[in-house]
Amino acid sequence: MEYTYAMLPDRVKAAVVDSVILIAGMYATSEVLALFDEVPNGVRIIAYVLLFVVYDPLFTSAFGATIGHSFSNIMVKKESNPHQNINFFSALLRFILKLLLGWLSLLTVTSHTKKRALHDFVGGSIVLKQAKP
């Protein structure tokens, strides 16, 4: 079966949208925590870290896309079976490498036939363009 792989601009657009979503989520979390008299700093740190670290892997494994991916009409699937989402562990590994390498991870997208970034190799994933109805 023939697939259309996501191009670099689609991925960048998704990353920008996800960044805005994360900032809004962190702001909302700080507003909720401000409703309480005394919230220990440890609780605040855990809330922010969980939001930041779990958002991408959870959405990618459960829905095949983050909100930014959906907005950009792209989805993350298993390379071995493009009809399945990657599991949470693979999505977490993929996210950690993407976080550690930053934009450097995207250097291979333009040269690889399946448009895979370095973090896609670790996660066993491909990023596909969603078919338009």
Image: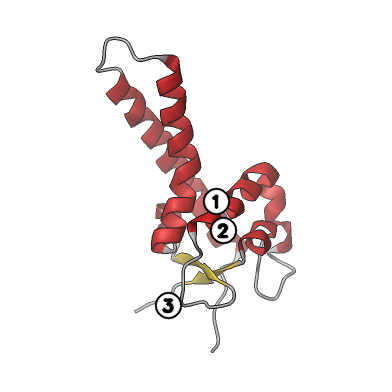
Q: Quadrant of residue 51?
A: top left
Nearest to the eye among marks 1 and 3: give it: 1
- Seen from the viewer's position, the closer of residues 15 and 89 is 89
**Residue 92, numbered label:** 1
Q: Amino acid at mark 2?
A: Ser
Label 2: element kind = helix
Nearest to the eye among marks 2 and 3: give it: 2
- x, y percent for residue 99: 62, 44
Tag 1–tag 3 contact (CB < 8 Å)? no
Quarter of the image with the C terminus is bottom left
Query: Which residue of the protein is positioned furthest toward the left in this rendering?
Result: 35
Q: Is residue 17 above or below residue 51?
A: below
Instruction: List the residue tagged with mark 2.
Output: 90
The number of callouts visible is 3
Q: Distance of mark 2 from mark 3, alpha carbons?
A: 24 Å
Q: Quadrant of residue 109?
A: bottom right
Q: Is residue 3 above or below residue 108?
A: below
Label 3: element kind = loop
Q: Amino acid at mark 3?
A: Ala
Tag 2–tag 1 contact (CB < 8 Å)? yes
- x, y percent for residue 60: 46, 58
Q: Does residue 17 show up? A: no
Q: Is residue 95 above or below residue 25?
A: below
- x, y percent for residue 10: 53, 61
> Which is more N-terminal, label 3 or label 1?
1
Quarter of the image with the N terminus is bottom right
Instruction: List the residue tagged with mark 3.
Output: 131
| x 57%, y 50%: residue | 95
Q: Residues within 10 Å of mark 3 (few under 14, many from 20)?
A: few
Q: Residues within 10 Å of mark 1 (few under 14, many from 20)?
A: many
